Amino acid sequence: METKKRAMIVDDSRLTQKQLAQILTDCGIDVTDIASNGLEAVDKVKAKQGAFDIITLDITMPQLDGVSALKQIMAIDSNACVLMVSAIGKENVIKACMAQGARNFIVKPFHAEKVKEIVRATVAA
C-alpha cells in the first residue's frame, strides 16, 4: 500500500493556507505542517528532514522571504520538492526560483483546478 504524500504549506495568509490545504487534500496529500514565514519553514525542514514530499512556499513573507527560504531549504535537502506561490508573476523572479531548485510556480490569485494540475504533475514527476 502506497503511503500518502506529506506537505508543508508556507504562507503568511491564513486564507491562502486554507485554500492550499483544501487543494492538497483534494489531491490526496496530507498537510502535516503549516508555517507563516520562511524562517519557520526552514526550521521545520531542519527538524523534520525528509518529512515533506511537497512544500508550497510563498515569496512575500515577513522575517524571511520565500526566495531566501528556498535557498536555505535546498541547502538542507537538495531533493526537496518546492512549489513557489506568489502574486509576483515576474519572469525574472520565476526563473531565479527555478534556478534555485523550485519545481514549479503558482501565481496568485490561483484557480483550484490549475493548482491541482500543477501539484499532480509535480508530485508524479
Image (cartoon, rainbow, N blue to C red):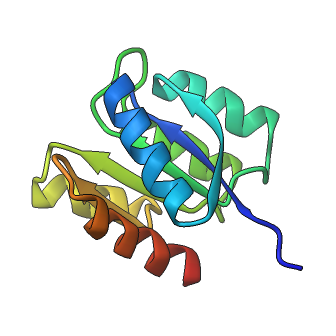
Q: Picture coordinates of residue 18 (x, y %)?
A: 42, 35
Q: Is residue 105 left or right of residue 45?
A: left
Q: Picture coordinates of residue 54 (x, y %)?
A: 58, 58
Residue at (42%, 34%) from the top-left corner? 17
What number of labels is visible? Answer: 0
52 shown above or below 99: above
The front one of 84 and 120 is: 120
| Picture quarter with the N terminus | bottom right
Q: Is residue 81 left or right of residue 121?
A: right
Q: Quadrant of residue 64?
A: top left
Q: Picture coordinates of residue 43 (x, y %)?
A: 68, 27
Furthest toward the right, the residue is 1
Q: Picture coordinates of residue 30 (x, y %)?
A: 66, 52
Furthest toward the top, the residue is 63
Q: Quadrant of residue 45?
A: top right
Residue at (45%, 68%) from the top-left corner? 119
| Picture quarter with the C terminus | bottom right
Residue at (78%, 50%) from the top-left corner? 51
56 shown above or below 12: below
Furthest toward the left, the residue is 90
The front one of 89 and 112 is: 112
